[in-house]
Image (cartoon, helix red, strand yellow):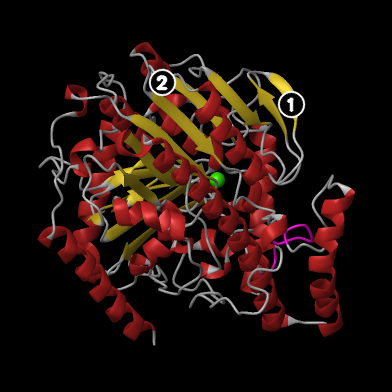
């Protein structure tokens, strides 16, 4: 069945590609600096997996239809879908710091959530201000409250993670209370900025950044019962046994079976609801929760129930994101801003939707190495185009500067995507990509690792003192990454090539031999305790 679906969707993808080749629209190919500089609307979600965008269905390895996102899909139909957008470090705060600076974590100093972002350093919004852009950020910032977001003429941001309901926010540093659903509120504020605060004499950068669909996955009042009557398809690896991989996959703490708590599973309502919100919430969840309690599920049945509860809430949060994006796109249409506004849809990283039995992110495995990236720019990008080059969130800052006709500083580590948007990938574009994750000890006990991929092969190195392990995957023969072929004689040549490439990239990107000291949050004592916990779990796994 899976194979059959794959074939159909491959045909669909080919058809879309053929449409692009056969029916080119008139596209202005002049450099952006030569004409009117475009506005930049950066639509940013938190933990939005590409598997949960219907426009990405043709490339999902598990190939299961999860949801329908008409407004995000509209951007793909009218613009370009990037199929291989990788993040340098698959975790929230660090990914944001990479975007702000155009530099890897070891260069911008923000390796782990909990590090302090140095807002005094060079960031792309500051550089856009210098060339005359009006800049604003609305929504989730998540780079700390020790200083307001730097480089913005206007900022209204959540405090830390922020709640899904009734969020206090910081408006240019001053606390403001809001009542309502956060995804709706962030959109209201975004539209208010466009309507009332935008300076029509200047091009703008507007960062419209949702909290959703981050963990706790609290849906909005409108969608509390969406998907109640259907079953979400399960991924093939929901009951992964982690054979074929090393210690880290076996000793993580991010499984649907073991790690999800009562908050995740909506056994308790979100905090600080108004009486009306509380009533609506309980009317939706109490009957479902009572049915669950009566069923007294165990074993795989319990995991299946948790998966359904998780996925439905996650997808409900995305339904609000998609609906609200529609409001913003309508505004651009209505006001004529559409033609000269580049709209970018992306997330800070991907997410596991039950693949390998997991939720959360962090790993270099495909689901979280990737993030969705869709760009619409009616004047310059052909509708329904698809790009397959290896691009990254380390390229975003450079791209935005290029769009504005500003100089890209030499110490940024990515490259502008503007030529790719024109369908003209430079011949020396990257063919391989370096990844590094630092946050151990940290939530979910995912070990530190680095690695390299060329899109076909992926080499991963877990490099801590007690777990020096390597994994190598052939994504063509093993798209789900179930069996490492590291050390297999058949892959000797590829392994040697990837090992050499890893060293080359580390030199090129100036990766230090030792991880930055600030990445050891809580010091070495916390580290030692986390390793002990892992070793205990390893013993349990082996029983
Ligand atoms: Ca995130």
Residue 176's label in the rendered image is 1
The quarter of the image holding the C terminus is bottom right
Q: Residue 540: which quarter of the image?
A: bottom right
Q: Which residue is depicted at the point 25% across and 56% down?
A: 386
| Residue 190 percent location from the top left of the image | 55, 34
Q: Earlier in the sequence, mark 1 or mark 2?
A: 1
Local secondary structure at mark 2: loop
Query: Does the image show residue 83?
Result: no
> Considering only vertical position in the picture, is 516 above or below 436?
above
Image height of 36 relative to 527, above or below: above
The residue positioned 26% from the left and 72% from the top of the image is 12
Q: Find the residue positioned furthest to the top.
A: 130
Disc 1/disc 2 C-alpha distance (Å): 26 Å
Residue closest to the far right? 275
Q: Is residue 345 visible?
A: yes
Q: Is residue 196 left or right of residue 163?
A: left
| 358 drawn magenta | no
Measured as percent of width and height from the top left, residue 356 is found at 52, 69
Q: Residue at x 42, y 16 (%)?
A: 126
Mark 1 CB within 8 Å of ligand 1: no
Q: Where does label 2 land, which residue?
A: 200
Answer with the quarter of the image where residue 319 lies. bottom right
Q: On the rendered structure, is 217 left or right of 279? A: left
Please give the range of residues in magenta. Answer: 257-264
Tell me where residue 228 appears, x and y as whole percent: 68, 74
Name above or below for residue 10 compared with residue 535: below
Residue 394, horizontal then vertical, whole percent: 36, 36
Q: Which of 38 and 455 is in front in this view?
A: 38
Between circles 1 and 2, the one closer to the viewer is 2
Q: Main secondary structure of the magenta part?
A: loop
Q: Is residue 258 magenta?
A: yes
């Amino acid at each position: 069945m899976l194979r059959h679906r794959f074939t159909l969707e491959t045909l669909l993808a080919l058809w879309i590609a053929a449409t692009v080749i056969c029916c080119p629209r008139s596209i202005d190919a002049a450099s952006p600096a030569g004409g009117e500089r475009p506005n930049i609307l950066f639509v940013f979600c938190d933990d939005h997996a590409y598997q949960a965008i219907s426009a990405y269905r043709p490339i999902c390895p598990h190939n299961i239809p999860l949801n329908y996102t008409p407004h995000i899909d509209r951007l793909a139909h009218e613009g370009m879908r990037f199929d291989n957008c990788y993040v340098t470090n698959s975790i929230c705060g660090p990914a944001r710091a990479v975007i702000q600076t155009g530099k890897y974590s070891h260069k911008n100093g923000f390796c782990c959530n909990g590090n302090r972002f140095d807002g005094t350093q060079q960031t792309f919004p500051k550089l856009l201000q210098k060339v005359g852009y009006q800049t604003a950020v609305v929504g989730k910032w998540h780079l700390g409250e020790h200083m307001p977001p730097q480089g913005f003429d206007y900022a209204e941001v959540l405090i830390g993670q922020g709640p899904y309901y009734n969020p206090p926010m910081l408006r240019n540093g001053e606390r403001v209370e809001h009542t309502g659903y956060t995804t709706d509120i962030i959109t209201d504020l975004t539209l208010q900025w466009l309507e009332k605060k935008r300076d029509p004499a200047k091009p703008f950068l507007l960062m419209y950044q949702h909290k959703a669909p981050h963990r706790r996955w609290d849906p909005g009042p409108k969608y509390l019962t969406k998907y109640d009557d259907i079953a979400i398809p399960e991924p093939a690896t929901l009951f992964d046994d982690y054979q074929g991989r090393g210690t880290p996959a076996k000793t993580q703490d991010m499984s649907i079976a073991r790690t999800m708590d009562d908050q995740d599973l909506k056994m308790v309502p979100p905090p600080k609801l108004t009486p009306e919100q509380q009533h609506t919430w309980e009317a939706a969840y109490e009957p479902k929760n009572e049915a669950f309690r009566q069923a007294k599920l165990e074993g795989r049945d319990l995991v299946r129930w948790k998966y359904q509860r998780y996925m439905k809430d996650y997808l409900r949060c995305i339904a609000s994101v998609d609906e609200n994006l529609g409001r913003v796109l309508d505004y651009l249409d209505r006001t004529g801003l559409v033609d000269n506004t580049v709209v970018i849809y992306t997330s800070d990283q991907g997410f596991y939707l039950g693949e390998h039995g997991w939720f959360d992110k962090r790993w270099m495995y495909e689901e979280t190495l990737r993030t969705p990236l869709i760009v619409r720019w009616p004047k310059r990008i052909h509708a329904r185009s698809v790009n397959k080059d290896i691009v990254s969130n380390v390229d975003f800052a450079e791209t935005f500067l290029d769009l504005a006709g500003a100089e890209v500083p030499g110490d940024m580590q990515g490259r502008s995507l503007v030529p790719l948007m024109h369908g003209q990938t430079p011949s020396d574009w990257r063919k391989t990509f370096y990844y590094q994750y630092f946050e151990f000890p940290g939530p979910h006990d995912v070990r530190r690792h680095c690695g390299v991929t060329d899109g076909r092969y992926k080499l991963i190195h877990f490099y801590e003192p007690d777990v020096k392990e390597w994994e190598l995957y052939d994504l063509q023969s093993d798209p789900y990454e179930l069996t490492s072929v590291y050390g297999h004689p058949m892959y000797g040549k590829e392994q040697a090539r990837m090992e050499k490439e890893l060293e080359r990239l580390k030199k090129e990107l100036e990766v230090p031999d030792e991880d930055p000291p600030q990445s050891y949050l809580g010091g070495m004592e916390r580290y030692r305790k986390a390793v002990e916990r892992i070793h205990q779990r390893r013993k349990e796994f082996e029983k």
